[in-house]
Image (spheres, helix red, strand yellow):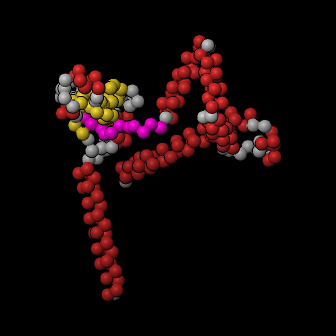
Amino acid sequence: MGHRLRANFLTGLIVVVPVVVTLYLTWAFITFVDGQVLPLVPAPYNPRTYIDADIPGYGLIVFLIFTTVVGYFAKKVFGKQLIRLGEDFVDRMPIVRSIYNALKQLVETVLSQSKTSFRQACLIEYPRRGLWAIAFISTDTKGEILKRSNSGEMVSVFLPTTPNPTSGFLLFVPKSDVVLLDMTIEEAAKLIISAGLVSPPSHEEVAAEQARIARRKEQLARVAGADMSNDKKS
């Protein structure tokens, strides 16, 4: 009984904790944005002026509308000129220039919607023969690197680090040395982030589990059918 209660508690914990943390972080983010934006909203447009209370999320909505409007004008010729003048002004400020460029690069990297992405997860022998590491195939190697390597067909792979998969190494590996994996990019990333603790099941294991569930359903259906037959006879 104690073992079952412990197992049920841990299972519930796995379900409840992510939901609670997500809701908490969402609410904290909304509260933070409201606290920064609402004091800047003119009184005629601030709900507190009329109902003597703040509407949760109102500041976030104002921020989204303001940012969208700024983005709209920034895409115009006049807006681009203003941005260029502002960046030229910032470039003349030594410390501010470094902070601004770093933040701009970070935001562009996070929010950029590039059409290119990793093609597939794979295994490569790294850092030596006999040791295997998960990597992501990005493109087929071309140009000078392929010509000077004299290794035939090669692929460019990104070898992420654990537990932070955003950092890693760019490697150029012969196609013959690459072992393709069936797992998705997301499953491979989870495996890397968890340091091997969260390992996705293989296709054979998934098929076996689905077959087991199907057999279980058939057994339950037969039992239910038998019970109904017995009830009709009685």
Q: Quadrant of the C terminus?
A: bottom left
Q: Residue at x 51, y 25 (%)?
A: 105
- Residue 121 position within the rendered picture, expressed as x and y whole percent measured from the top left: 30, 38
- Front one among 222 and 48: 48
Q: Residue at x 50, y 46 (%)?
A: 19
Q: Nearer the viewer, residue 152 or 182?
A: 152
Rendering coords of residue 17 (x, y %) = 48, 44
Q: What's the magenta bit mostly, secondary-structure-wise?
A: loop
On screen, 71 above or below 11? above
Task: Please identify the quarter of the rendering in which residue 29 is found.
Answer: top right
* Residue farthest along the front direction in this orientation: 77
Q: How many marks?
A: 0
Q: Residue 174: say if magenta.
A: no
Q: Position of residue 44 (x, y in %)?
A: 81, 42
Q: Is residue 217 above or below residue 40?
A: below
Q: Residue at x 21, y 31 (%)?
A: 153
Range shown magenta: 113-123
Q: Is residue 225 above or below residue 107?
A: below
Q: Is residue 42 left or right of residue 104?
A: right
- Whether residue 197 is visible here, answered yes or no, is no
Q: Nearer the viewer, residue 88 or 30?
A: 88
Name which quarter of the figure residue 68 lies in.
Answer: top right
Q: Nearer the viewer, residue 105 or 60?
A: 105
| Visible residue check, residue 93 | yes
Task: Please state, as top left, top right, bottom left or bottom right, where the N terminus lies in the image.
Answer: bottom left
Is 46 positioned to the left or the right of 218 in the image? right
Q: Position of residue 137 (x, y in %)?
A: 30, 35
Q: Residue at x 19, y 23 (%)?
A: 150
